[in-house]
């Protein structure tokens, strides 16, 4: 069977734009992931802490970096009203 024209492009676009969810976990510490790093061989998920820690390494390898750390501030930052 032959792929339809454009199937590959559509598939890649869907992967790149899929938002990170609470089910996405940091590959290093299992905290909720807010950064997706797409590499030629696959992808890695990082929490904000590990994204910063590993940024120098993946910056030169990644084909795409999806940074949603601004959502971390929106959800858990000032104004969240959490007791501490
Ligand atoms: Zn982490």
Image (spheres, rainbow, N blue to C red):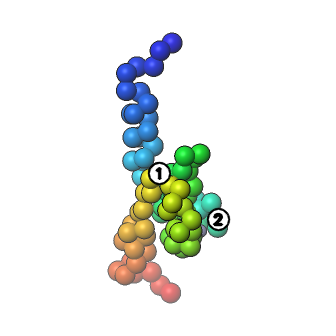
Q: Which badge, 1 or 2, comes first in the chain's sequence?
A: 2
The reply to whether residue 54 is in sight is: yes
Q: Is residue 20 left or right of residue 32?
A: left
| Residue at 59%, 62% in the rendered image | 26
Foreground residue, 74 or 59?
59
Q: Is residue 54 left or right of residue 69?
A: right
The single residue placed furthest to the bottom in the displayed view is 84
- For mark 1, give the secondary structure: loop
CB of mark 2 near ligand 1 (< 8 Å): yes
Foreground residue, 17 or 65?
65
* Rendering coords of residue 12 (x, y %): 44, 39
Vertical order, 31 against 80 (above or below): above
Q: Is residue 77 left or right of residue 42?
A: left
Residue under label 2: 28
Residue 58 placement: quadrant: bottom right
Residue under label 1: 63
* Rendering coords of residue 39 (x, y %): 54, 50
Residue 44 placement: quadrant: bottom right
The reply to whether residue 21 is in sight is: no
Q: Is residue 74 left or right of residue 44?
A: left
């Amino acid at each position: 069977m032959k792929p339809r024209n454009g199937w590959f492009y559509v598939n890649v676009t869907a992967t790149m734009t899929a938002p990170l969810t609470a089910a996405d976990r940091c590959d290093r510490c299992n905290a909720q992931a807010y950064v997706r790093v797409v590499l030629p061989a696959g992808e890695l998920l990082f929490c904000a802490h590990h994204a910063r820690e590993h940024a120098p390494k993946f910056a030169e390898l990644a084909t795409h970096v999806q940074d949603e750390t601004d959502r971390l501030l929106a959800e858990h930052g000032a104004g969240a009203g959490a007791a501490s």
